[in-house]
Image (spheres, rainbow, N blue to C red):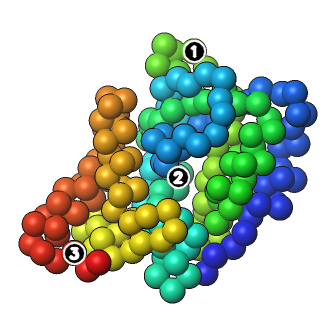
Amino acid sequence: MSKNTFAENQLRHALDDDAQVWLFGYGSLIYLVDFPYLESRPASIRGWSRRFWQGSHDHRGTEENPGRVVTLIDEPGAVCGGLAYLVEAPVFRQLDHREKNGYLRVATDMTFADGAQATGLTYIATSDNEAWLGEASEYEIALHICGAEGPSGPNDEYLLELASALRKLGQHDAHVFEIESHIGQIRSAGADRR
């Protein structure tokens, strides 16, 4: 079931309209940049891992058949790579709408590729949100992804675009790449459920 978190996010981290804020993207924000930004830099955050454990009822799936998209899970010692965008505060109105299905804005420290650090915001969907699908094996996730599609397109397109973007950034993510491999095998075997 989806839950609209737009209003809740508008109340979190009150931002002056003239403020500039770093945004950390680790999923579709890496490859589907439909918002204005002032600067973009490769970055990483510590203590978090990217996982396809969040349901997508509004973009890569439907209420009846939600897709799977990434969120961050707390994992001591882990490093999650992505892109940081310097944005003007009003951009968060657009981002809060885009990330409204269970994601909440949270503050995070990020490290840029050159070693510089900054604090910014990212979106995380936790296990207590109504769209949470939870843990599954990479193969089960691949099967699920192959069978979902929503207003923003096929769920497997999201996974494949993310994997491609991570490679271009020189960032390895075993979870994402293993799901990608399973999707290739499922397609080759003709087991794609779409």
The amino acid sitting under disc 2 is Leu
Percent from the top left, x then y, of residue 4?
72, 69
The amino acid sitting under disc 3 is Asp
Would you say the residues marked 1 and 2 are in contact, meaning their CB atoms lie under 8 Å apart? Answer: no
Percent from the top left, x then y, of residue 74?
53, 51
As measured in the structure, the alpha-carbon distance from the residue carrying label 1 to the one carrying label 2 is 22 Å
Residue 117 sits above or below residue 152 on the image: above
SS label for mark 2: strand
Residue that mark 3 sits on: 192
Q: Residue at x 53, y 23 (%)?
A: 41
Residue that mark 1 sits on: 116
> Left or right: 14 with respect to 108?
right
Report if residue 105 is visible in the image. Answer: no
As measured in the structure, the alpha-carbon distance from the residue carrying label 1 to the one carrying label 3 is 44 Å
- The quadrant the C terminus occupies is bottom left
Residue that mark 2 sits on: 72
